[in-house]
Amino acid sequence: MLQAINLRKSYNSLEVLKGIDLTIQRAEIVSIVGSSGAGKSTLLHILGTLDEPDAGEVLFDGQNITNLGRTALARFRNRHIGFVFQFHNLLPEFTAIENVCLPAYLADRSENEVRVRARELLGLLNLDHRVDHKPSEMSGGEQQRVSVARALINSPEIIFADEPSGNLDSKNAQELHELFFWLRKEFGQTFVIVTHNDTLAQMADRTIVMRDGHIIEG
Ligand SMILES: Nc1ncnc2c1ncn2[C@@H]1O[C@H](COP(=O)(O)OP(=O)(O)OP(=O)(O)O)[C@@H](O)[C@H]1O
Ligand SMILES: [Mg+2]
């Protein structure tokens, strides 16, 4: 489903990715681990089209997505890719359901259909009682589940998560991890998860280990 070929990225004289090759199958859950500064987030951002490589290609279902124009890229990302970050990035002025609906409005979907789906997703994530709460009125675990619902609203084929449980206590982290596996079972969702959490890394089908801009395992 996703293939990276010889990805390279530098920031000024700092070489952060030194030729990354990897393949990810549909419905696979892959974790990416490695010490701080190894290049994990940089790789995730490039795979998720949030950043461009200096060299190399990313293919999605065989299509090269590294050279799409701005508009085509934004549309592609909005339809096919979901993101979950360590800091949930919810908009503070909006309620849970409004935050979840936003990416769907950007995709020009009808408001009614989207709100029905958003309620459904929030229900699946045990957030029925928090639909109209703003982020500041929710716990960290609840906020993170809202951000997962937001990542799912456009039914993306692949979800990229960068330390999704980095700010959760162990119980909430555990629940979030179980949620990822349940989503894969229910929806055939594909996940690429950067994590420092050993338990989550080991639950994955496959663990990719990065060191100093290279993949050294996986
Ligand atoms: N926008 C940027 N400009 C300059 N240097 C950057 C930029 N983004 C990342 N770097 C550098 O690239 C290297 C890799 O960063 P990256 O964020 O990919 O690491 P990481 O593996 O995700 O680390 P962590 O586990 O701490 O999140 C680091 O040395 C970082 O300082
Ligand atoms: Mg990082």
Image (spheres, grey):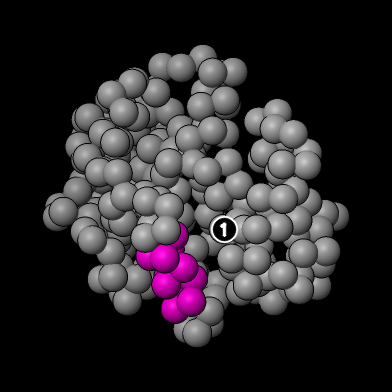
Task: Locate residue 99, reporting x and y percent.
Answer: 73, 52
Task: Locate residue 69, reporting x and y percent.
Answer: 51, 15
Q: Is the residue marked 1 within 8 Å of ligand 2, measured from its CB?
A: no
Q: Is residue 57 magenta?
A: no
Residue positioned 76% across, 70% down in the render: 130
Magenta region: 173-183
The answer to whether residue 71 is left or right of residue 33 is right
On the question of residue 89 being in view, the answer is no
On the question of residue 109 being in view, the answer is yes
Residue positioned 29% across, 36% down in the render: 1
- Count of numbered badges drawn on the protein: 1
Quadrant housing residue 75: top right
Task: Locate residue 149, reporting x and y percent.
Answer: 60, 56
Q: Quadrant of the C terminus?
A: bottom left
Residue positioned 28% across, 70% down in the render: 203
Q: Nearer the viewer, residue 79 or 217?
A: 79
Q: For numbered disc 1, what is the local secondary structure? A: helix
Residue marked by disc 1: 148
Quadrant housing residue 108: top right
Residue positioned 25% across, 43% down in the render: 25
Q: In the orientation shown, which residue stands out farthest toward the left?
A: 217
The answer to whether residue 95 is left or right of residue 61 is right
The answer to whether residue 143 is left or right of residue 175 is right
Task: Locate residue 78, reporting x and y percent.
Answer: 57, 34
Hey, what amino acid is under mark 1? Answer: Val
Is most of the magenta stretch helix, strand or loop?
helix
